Image: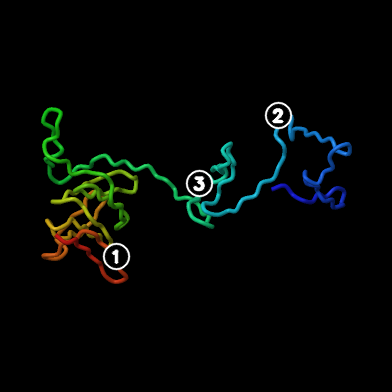
Amino acid sequence: MPGTHLALNGEAYKVVSDEMLPSGRRALTRSFRPSEPSDPGRIVTRRWKLSGPIGRSREGGDGVLGHEYSIDLETRFDSLLTSGGARTALSMQDAASSSPQLGAFALGSAPLGVSGVGDVAHIIEDRRFLFVGRGRGVTQINSSMAAVQTTFFDAQVRGMAVEGGKHFVGVGPTQTVREADSVSATTTTYSEALANTYADSLLEGSDRLWMVRREP
């Protein structure tokens, strides 16, 4: 909102609002000039609370403050303004697996079987590599952000978590929980984590791994 006081030559003057100006024969004549020759707009002051979300600094014609000076800043949270996370392009091209997958072949224009790769549902980090759970597969991503291997399981990946220096994969009631035994630059091997143990969601605890299984 406009200020109520003005300082000129070290003297403070109170700015008279429009409703306080005289009218009729004593009315004052006012005119405005552009703030700059190329900008016909009037110089005004606007204030808004940096809250919920914050960092928005340009008012559009619809009165909504848009993002102008908040590039690379996180503005979604109330009363909090932080640097935004760095975005890295990630190629999710299908990586070779240890054995051919039925869904990877086509009969004419139709796929033969069901492809094991689906939408990304889980992302975890284990031994300096990223592992992405999507569909029935877990894809290993190297430091160059490229897919190097995809391991397929009997059912859709329903949970992933890291505990005890290795990651685990939950694939529901048809296959026991799998654990990543070894991780190299190009290959990850999995084995049964515990006999007769099935799980959907996996959660890392302070000193143990929590396994959640849905009722049949």
Label 1 – label 3 distance at C-alpha: 31 Å
Asked if one can make out residue 72 in the rendered structure from this viewpoint, the answer is yes
- Give whichever of 21, 134 is nearer the camera: 21
Q: Which mark is residue 204?
A: 1
Q: Position of residue 152 (x, y in %)?
A: 17, 48
Disc 3 or disc 2, which is closer to the eye?
2
Cα–Cα span, label 2 and label 1 = 60 Å
* Left or right, residue 174 beside residue 51: left
Which three-letter amino acid code belongs to the residue tagged 2?
A: Ser
Find residue 145 and report its horizontal and vertical position in percent: 33, 45
- Badge 2 or badge 1: first in the primary sequence: 2
The amino acid pointed to by label 1 is: Glu
- Dividing the picture into quadrants, the one containing residue 65 is top right
Counting from the top left corner in percent of width and height, residue 15 is at: 80, 48
The answer to which of marks 3 and 2 sits earlier in the sequence is: 2
Q: Residue at x 26, y 49 (%)?
A: 140
> Could you tell me which quadrant the C terminus lies in?
bottom left
Q: Alpha-carbon distance for marks 3 and 2?
A: 30 Å
